[in-house]
Image: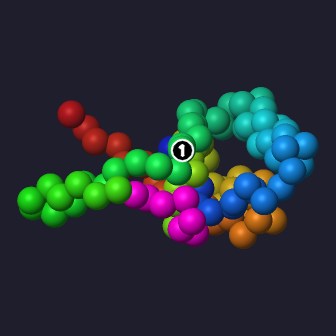
């Protein structure tokens, strides 16, 4: 099995009532539980929308990302899959697709040290 990172973008649920947000979170919890039961879930975290960006050779620090951006990374998982095709199948259960969420799937590189 190889490691793949799922990077979650968008999927804004802030317009939902607190009850609807909680119901949606239950879908996330169920998905994580399923991946854990299948021994595919390695790790994951949700991220707050605020932060800082450091860029360029001068290491310029700016505010951002900004919550109103559809490109905001909301969190990530690291999962185990035999190949990219299987990682894509696992990602199809992403609960935020219904709210225009996007998953970027990236293989994790193993470095021999």
For residue 89, which quarter of the picture? bottom right
Q: Is residue 74 left or right of residue 52?
A: right
For residue 59, which quarter of the picture? bottom left
Main SS of residues in magenta: loop
Q: Is residue 95 left or right of residue 77?
A: right
Q: Is residue 30 above or below residue 74?
A: above
**Residue where numbered disc 1 is placed:** 48
- In terms of depth relative to the viewer, which is nearer, 112 or 102? 102
Q: Kindly identify the residue that appears in the image at 84 percent across and 44 percent down.
A: 18
- In terms of depth relative to the viewer, which is nearer, 20 or 77? 20
Q: Is residue 95 above or below residue 99?
A: above
Q: Kindly identify the residue that appears in the image at 28 percent across and 58 percent down.
A: 62
For the residue carrying disc 1, how many other residues have a C-alpha within 10 Å: few (<14), some (14-19), or many (20+)? few
Query: Which stretch is magenta?
Result: 64-70
For residue 30, which quarter of the picture? top right
- Residue 94 position within the rendered picture, expressed as x and y whole percent measured from the top left: 74, 55
- Residue 57 position within the rendered picture, expressed as x and y whole percent measured from the top left: 9, 61
- In terms of depth relative to the viewer, which is nearer, 52 or 44? 52
Q: Is residue 20 left or right of residue 108?
A: right
- In terms of depth relative to the viewer, which is nearer, 34 or 47? 47
- Residue 55, visible in the rendered structure: yes
């Amino acid at each position: 099995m190889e490691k793949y990172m799922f990077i979650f973008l968008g999927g804004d649920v802030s317009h939902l009532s607190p009850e609807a947000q909680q119901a949606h979170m239950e879908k996330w919890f169920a998905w994580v539980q399923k991946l854990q039961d299948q021994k595919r879930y390695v790790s994951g975290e949700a991220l707050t929308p605020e932060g800082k960006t450091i860029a360029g050779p001068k290491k310029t620090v700016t505010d951002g990302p900004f919550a109103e951006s559809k490109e905001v990374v909301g969190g990530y998982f690291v999962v185990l899959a035999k190949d990219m095709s299987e990682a894509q199948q696992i990602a199809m259960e992403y609960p935020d697709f219904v709210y225009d969420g996007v998953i970027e799937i990236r293989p994790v590189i193993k470095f021999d040290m």
